[in-house]
Image (cartoon, grey):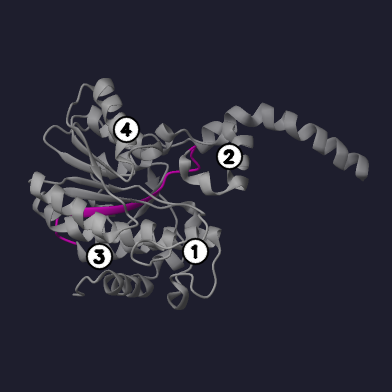
Amino acid sequence: MIGVLLLLLLLLPLLLFIAAPQIRKMLSNGVCTSTAQLPGKVAVVTGANTGIGKETAKELAQRGARVYIACRDVQKGELVAREIQTMTGNQQVFVRKLDLADTKSIRAFAGGFLAEEKHLHILINNAGVMMCPYSRTADGFEMHIGVNHLGHFLLTHLLLEKLKESAPSRVVNVSSLAHLLGRIHFHNLQGEKFYSAGLAYCHSKLANILFTKELARRLEGSGVSVYSVHPGTVHSELTRHSFLMRCLWRIFSFFIKTPQEGAQTSLHCALAEGLEILSGSHFSDCRVTWVTAQARNMTVARRLWDVSCDLLGIPMD
């Protein structure tokens, strides 16, 4: 028995090497095939100074959109904007300060954008934090729920009238397969009683999907459609807070998507024709995919909406 186990352990690397191309292809499925061009269209992408967001902004600019890179690190954002301008020939790529961990910054960004622009056709809520040690935002929210959910909730709320005026328009919320382990514990929403960095991330990604479903319900007939996406397992800076995750990403790097591959589902939901009927759906690899019963619970979605409004000081309707 021991001999068999040793043999399997010795053969495993060889088997993985042989199967690697097929596994890699399977894990990087899903390509945005839309040929839509975007001259005259305006897009905002949060966290577009790196990773998936950067690749998303680059593709939107390539198609002729007026693109706003909304990020905390303006200096890094400016470098990316110049890179995109050079690569695409589109000079309408702008950087604006947005710190999703500070509602004052979110309101300042939205105010500035609304003063600058008459339209908004695409909002991609892409930025996020993952597995960071327990900390709070400038407003006292636990960092994961504060940035990943509440920050984008407020941003979307502030830009919603502009999206309606610009219809047809779309909102894309970047979630994760990690929502499978997520739960919305209203008695512990801020991690006051129990905190796990990994689970806090999962909870916030579940919140992204519930927000998407409730927002889509409220926007029926408005011309604004909403989607949540799982981009796949992607090389990005999200793992910077976890030494273990960085090690795993390095070991299995051959099987992990590039940021460009990871951006495909966001682009599909932002651009593909005829998706309006699927507003509120969750996508992975450019197609509708299954979500947990928790993520389909509209009672929880409506309560989360009300709690989010209360925390952010938004009037409930």
Magenta residues, start to end: 220-235
Circle 2 residue: 249
Circle 3 residue: 217
Q: Look at the image and say whether residue 232 sits in the magenta stretch.
A: yes
In this rendering, does residue 26 appear at all? yes
Circle 4 residue: 33
Specify the amino acid type for callout 2: Trp
Query: What whole-number distance in Å separates the C-alpha atoms at marks 3 and 2?
Result: 37 Å
Residue occupying the point 42% across, 42% down: 285
Q: Look at the image and say whether residue 127 sits in the magenta stretch.
A: no
Query: What whole-number distance in Å separates the C-alpha atoms at marks 1 and 3?
Result: 22 Å
Which callout, 1 or 4, points at the residue further toward the start of the chain? 4
Circle 3 packing at 10 Å, graded few (<14), some (14-19), many (20+), is some
Compare residues 69 and 164 and report the one nearer the observer.
69
Query: What whole-number distance in Å separates the C-alpha atoms at marks 4 and 3?
Result: 27 Å
Instruction: Name the quadrant containing residue 164.
Output: bottom left
Look at the numbered disc 2 and give the secondary structure of its residue: helix
Specify the amino acid type for callout 3: Arg
Circle 2 packing at 10 Å, graded few (<14), some (14-19), many (20+), is some
Circle 1 residue: 182
Q: Nearer the viewer, mark 2 or mark 4?
A: 2
Specify the amino acid type for callout 1: Gly
Q: Are marks 1 and 4 in contact (CB under 8 Å)?
A: no
Q: Are marks 2 and 1 in contact (CB under 8 Å)?
A: no
